[in-house]
Amino acid sequence: MEYLLLIYSSEAGNRQRPAAEDQAIFGEYMKFTQDLNASGKNRGGNALEGVSTATTVRVRNGKTLVTDGPFAETKEQLGGYYLVDAKDLDEAIAIAARIPGARFGSIEVRPIMKLPG
Amino acid sequence: MDTGAIDNFYREQFGRILATVIRLVGDFDLAEEATQEAFATALEQWPGEGMPGNPRAWVISVARHKAIDHIRRRARFEERQGELQRLIELENAPADDGAQESGVPDERLSLIFTCCHPAIARDAQVALALRTLCGLTTEEIARAFVMPTPTMAQRLVRAKRKITAARIPYQVPPPETLAERLDAVMTVIYLVFNEGYGASSGDTLLRTDLSAEAIRLGRILVELMPALAEPHGLLALMLIQNSRRDARVDANGDLVLMEDQDRSRWHGEEIVEGLRLTAEAMRSGQPGPYALQAAIASEHARASRAEDTDWRSIAKLYGMLVEQRPSPVIELNRAVAVAMAEGPERGLELIAAIQRRRALRDYFLMWSAKGDLERRLGRFKAAADSYRRALELVGTAPERRFLQKRIDEVERVR
């Protein structure tokens, strides 16, 4: 089963972090990603540009409405994601808990829908 | 073969049978439906034909076939690969699943941990546990929680959908998460008990059905995890509290404080069992919060008259409890015990400390406890004010009547 681990944290908070600490967290992410690769459970993932670069698209009555910014304005913003292969929700939660961002932000765990056929 | 015997069998075995069928079928929702149908078939056949030699294996086998029928129908309509795969597996599984009474493993523990999984909302955990482990109908659960049946039904459907869609595992959690997850299970059981024991709304103080179901769940947990201390503590706590149910309200349904209760109306056999379980839970050396609460309840249960209560021990136990579970409510209880052991003034000091932190301001028991201590010190005006504040915050009718009576008393002596 595949799960998308969405990494939320406060962009404002991230900007205020001292450079040395930033470096350390970056190192932790590198290490986490290597471990995940080694376990064969990594299906992909990326860091995202800031929400100020986000665009939201909706189609209503056949017309495309484009608005600036993310869908929901919240205190924490989606900053990146991993797509992982886990045997069940407990394993997905265990992997999510190891993401460095889980300590200062939140990880949303979403099962990938299996389409019929 | 009367339907009463079948009812008893249903009550006692539903959870255990469902737990096995879930493992066989691999789908929570489908297993529940199939198990319901199997019991319905039993209700049709058994009164005429008599109960089969191994009724549990009979129901499991019928449920398995019902599930196969469901999957076959679904698979035909939707031609889902996964469903067909599942069907082949199920049809080829050995037919003698649970054929011998002893051969049916007790899988309720997996069920308990699945129902109380932290990824499910707390309210839904409670409803699921009652639905699956105790076999209560959706209507019964809705009635117990004073909620419209469709709302409760939707809550259950959403929870079951999440179990399947997010693939919440059907298993006892591994050692590294067991303690934390067991905690969640015990919270759910104690929540059910309290919902029954001190109903948070409505006119009935005791919804005994829910308390009885919680005790049943507690027993299952002790039976399934006999080596662990805390489940013993939880069961002991519930039994001892429940032993006071008849003395806790008077003929008008009004609340009677423990000190005023007719202790001859406490249920002795529950106390005896509770004391024994408490001793076992405390033997571990490092008692957890449920063991400590059971030990406190035991101190009350042991005193044949209110004035014989060992308040010093109780205050000490509350001190240990507050260290493990820092909470203003426990501090309040400690304050009351200290007041009993060392005088109302010491108790009021501790309550003042809670108030300085602006905690419990909307908690009616804080105000009624404060009123009681003030009344004991003869500060009747302050007592009346505290009781009145409590009255503004309280929910159930018997508790309201109790506070009004106290207000009338202190106003009379003033």
Image (spheres, coloured by chain):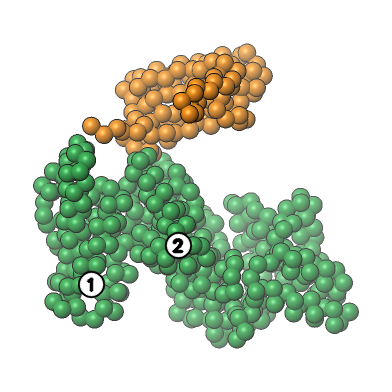
Chain colours: A orange, B green
Q: Quadrant of residue A1?
A: top left
Amino acid found under the numbered disc labelled 2: Thr
Q: Chain of mark 1?
A: B
Name the N-terminal-most of marks 1 and 2.
Answer: 1
* Closer to the eye: label 1 or 2: 2
Amino acid found under the numbered disc labelled 1: Leu
Residue name at image x 35 percent, y 41 percent: B165
Q: Position of residue A3 (x, y in %)?
A: 38, 31
**Crowd around label 2: few <14 · some 14–19 · many ≥20 (10 Å):** some
Tag 1–tag 2 contact (CB < 8 Å)? no
How far apart marks 1 and 2 lie (CA) works out to: 24 Å
Q: Nearer the viewer, residue B44 or B263?
A: B44
Q: Position of residue B10 (x, y in %)?
A: 29, 69
- Image: B77 above or below B220: above
Mark sitting on residue B43: 1
- Image: A1 above or below B178: above
**Crowd around label 1: few <14 · some 14–19 · many ≥20 (10 Å):** some
Q: Chain of mark 2?
A: B
Residue name at image x 59 percent, y 51 percent: B324
Look at the numbered disc 1 and give the secondary structure of its residue.
helix
Residue name at image x 55 percent, y 61 percent: B292
Residue at the disc numbered 2: B149
Would residue B375 be found to the left or right of residue B292 on screen? Answer: right
- Image: A34 above or below B383: above
Quadrant placement of the C terminus of chain A: top left
Q: Nearer the viewer, residue B93 or B373?
A: B93
